[in-house]
Amino acid sequence: MTENKNPTIATVCSHTSLQIFDGARKEGFKTLGICLGKPPGFYDAFPRAKPDEFFSVSSYQEIIEKTPELIEKDVIIIPHGSFVEYLGASDFARLEVPSFGNKSVLEWESNRTKEREWLTSAGVPVPAEYSSPDDARGPVIVKYHGAKGGRGFFIANNQQEIEDKLDTSEEYVIQEFVLGTRYYLHFFYSPLRIDGYRVGDGTLELLGIDRRIESNIDELYKIGAASGIDPSFVVTGNLPMVLRESLLPKVFELGERVVERSIELFGGMIGPFCLETICTDTLEFKVFEISARIVAGTNLFVSGSPYSDLIEPDLSTGKRIAQEIRLAIEMDRLGDVVS
Ligand code: AMP
């Protein structure tokens, strides 16, 4: 564990790195950008988000090999979606460089079965799953295991369609297709702060909401449902969202249950996380996924969101992470937010 009162905040130069570096700088930290090959030129276009120093590696695996150098530089790594994806969840779990958050969450999040167990045992509504095409009721989305980048899913309206499209040589789940509007809720759980919406020994914040824009599904309606084109769910960007204010109690209840259960299961999910939800026309939320770290939709809110503005002005998720590290150092509790 770092002894220094002023560690360097490091992350991989991708995904949400701009707000992570910008936020760290605003909280008085030095910053280090881990990049593949030469430092990317685009940071020159965003001077406030350019890391103080770059650390080049030839592959993500080299980050593991260079662990002693990173420890020597006294860095705290901020894991983001691309970081964990490119390094691989198991290598990230073994990484000995201090990183923000509780690494035990990986075991529960990177496996669809365990993730579902976490959510259901927390009392959070999730889409129904059917063990075979015969049991399926209504429209379904079939997800192959290991499907990545929004490909490898298909939608079917009935049992016959599932059987026609299904490749049984692969592992899959058949899930209820929940019709409604998608909201990606950006939460932050602090085990340190006690002023706010109390959960466990800490507080739960809602820093923003987005919706992912997915190609081609989001525009498929334009050529008609009967086009015969298979939808894909490739994320190409994000839109800012706000919810009907009367739905906020339900949203906090979802976040609260997931955090409370995480404390029981593996000592708690710390820092930013996102519940990926669909709100139906009966105003019920179903959670179809959880991301246990900063998500790319937070990039919309570099200078705050309609929710984080009500906590303090100019609060991005990147800045909030840096604040938590600063607070932990001041309280001499870095071990509670870094693993
Ligand atoms: P995922 O990889 O689980 O995040 O899902 C990718 C996309 O598929 C989501 O962003 C949704 O657009 C869609 N999706 C996933 N699960 C469901 C579901 N049960 N019902 C409706 N749409 C879903």
Image: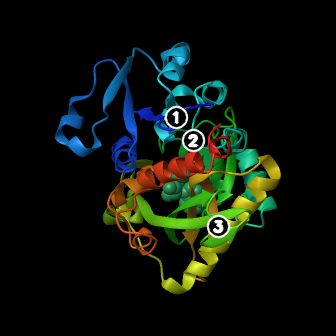
Quarter location, residue 67: top right
Three-letter amino acid code of the residue under disc 1: Ile
Three-letter amino acid code of the residue under disc 3: Ile
- Do tag 1 and tag 2 residues touch (Cβ < 8 Å)? yes
Task: Give above or below for 91 relative to 111.
Answer: above
Q: CA distance from mark 2 to mark 3?
A: 19 Å
Q: Quadrant of the C terminus?
A: top right
> SS for tag 3?
loop
256 lies left or right of 82? right
Residue 119 point in image, percent of width and height: 73, 58
Mark 3 closeness class: few <14, some 14–19, many ≥20 residues within 10 Å = some
> SS for tag 1?
strand
Mark 2 closeness class: few <14, some 14–19, many ≥20 residues within 10 Å = many
**Residue occupying the point 77% across, 54% down:** 263
**Ligand 1 contact, mark 3 (Cβ < 8 Å):** no
Do we see residue 39 in this rendering? yes
Q: Nearer the viewer, mark 1 or mark 3?
A: 3
Q: Earlier in the sequence, mark 1 or mark 2?
A: 1
Q: Which residue is mark 2?
A: 100
Three-letter amino acid code of the residue under disc 2: Phe
Residue 163 point in image, percent of width and height: 66, 48
**Residue occupying the point 64% across, 57% down:** 192
Total labels drawn: 3
Ligand 1, seen in the image, is in the quarter at bottom right
Q: Nearer the viewer, residue 217 or 122?
A: 122
Q: Which residue is mark 3?
A: 194
Q: CA distance from mark 1 to mark 2?
A: 7 Å
